[in-house]
Amino acid sequence: MTNSQFVRVLVVDDSAYVRKVVTQMLSRSPFIDVVGTARDGREALERVQELKPDVVTCDLIMPELDGVGFVREQMVRRPVPIVIVSVASESGELVLNALDAGAVDFIQKPTALASDRLLEMSDDLIGKVKAVASSRVRVANLAPATPKQMDAPVARGAFDIVVIGISTGGPQALREVIPRLPADLPVPLLIVLHMPIGYTELYAQKLNELSPLSVCEAEEGLLLTRGMAVIAPAGRHLTIRRDGTGVRAHLDVKPLDAPYRPSVDVLFQSAADVYGSRVLGVVMTGMGSDGRGGAAWIKAKGGTVITESEDSCVVYGMPRSIEEAGLSDRSISLDGMADAILGYL
């Protein structure tokens, strides 16, 4: 939350009806003050300069200047947390482009704004806006990192798998970490990233284009091998099972009571059950506490858990929950995360 009592929000959408509905949604919270609206990206740039909002919600497809163009230009002028509000039928590539440009999160609006999903979307939108109000806005830096000498507190070769849990700010953060890992990474790397259904496959494809590692969305029965990074598909939990030929991915909608699907907790527990102490768990930027229970499971089995430090998190929620529970072995800034992971392997 910002220093003031209210989170000041600018709503940007070319539809007057959508601007009204989103304003009403946000106004359900006593801690949010919608200070203005804009019809397109060009007007939004002027309104941000005039009103200096804490958060901007923004549509993608607009006349004059679209959502991606607005995000890019605004990040040059003055970084501000921007949440993309997009209909599901829009191009997933546009959403990912907006995140690359610096938007901190996105939410899908139902195609029929009079539907029963509005209340559910309203709660989600309020939660995201409040969470990102004090966030650190980052634009992905894809320049090669200078390797750093880091003393790992455990012997190299002590791990057989790396599991990562990440949420708000995750697409940008992973674009900084994964491309810096080598093709000959000695273990498989599994990732739970909280994203709406329909985006994880495209995101994995784009990340694969940038990375020496082989990056893919998980499929049922996928054999896990070294040098691969596997992203859990939105809407299904990713776990692992050992059979006579090796360790394979398993996808399931159960457990149904998990707050998120896929769940970081579910992946972490599964990895610890299969690999015991030879699991390196990594919890990075994100709101909430998904991963805390799984981190406890990894630690109980003798594994190691590292967290992204507060200074680089877009939202210091998930890592904070690990730190406060005394489960983090080490706190590492984003620009040193790839080197830190390699230091353990």
Image: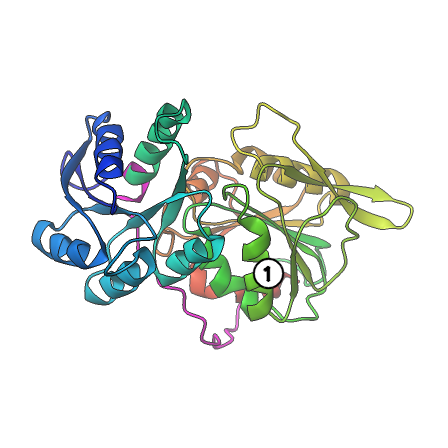
Identify the residue shown where x is 75% and y is 44%: 220
What's the amino acid at mark 1?
Gln
Residues in magenta? 130-151
In this picture, is 179 found above or below 55?
A: below
In this figure, which colouring scheme has been used for the structure?
A: rainbow
| Residue 304 locus on image (x, y percent) | 61, 48
Residue 99: image x %, image y %? 40, 56
Q: Quadrant of residue 277?
A: top right
Q: Is residue 263 above or below residue 13?
A: above
Q: Quadrant of the N terminus?
A: top left
Q: How many marks can you see?
A: 1
Circle 1 — which element?
helix
Q: At x 47% / y 50%, what residue is drawn?
A: 284
The answer to which quarter of the image holds residue 317 is top left
Give how far across and how far down residue 310 sits, in percent. 37, 51
Q: In the rendered structure, does residue 188 fall within the stretch colored magenta?
A: no
Question: Most prominent secondary structure in the magenta stretch?
Answer: loop
Q: Is residue 288 left or right of residue 161?
A: left
**Residue 15 x, y percent position in the rendering:** 25, 42
Q: Quadrant where the C terminus lies? A: bottom right
Residues 6 and 97: in front is 97
| Badge 1: residue crowd in 10 Å (few <14, some 14–19, many ≥20) | some
The residue that appears at 34% across and 54% down in the rendered structure is 103
Q: Which residue is mark 1?
A: 205
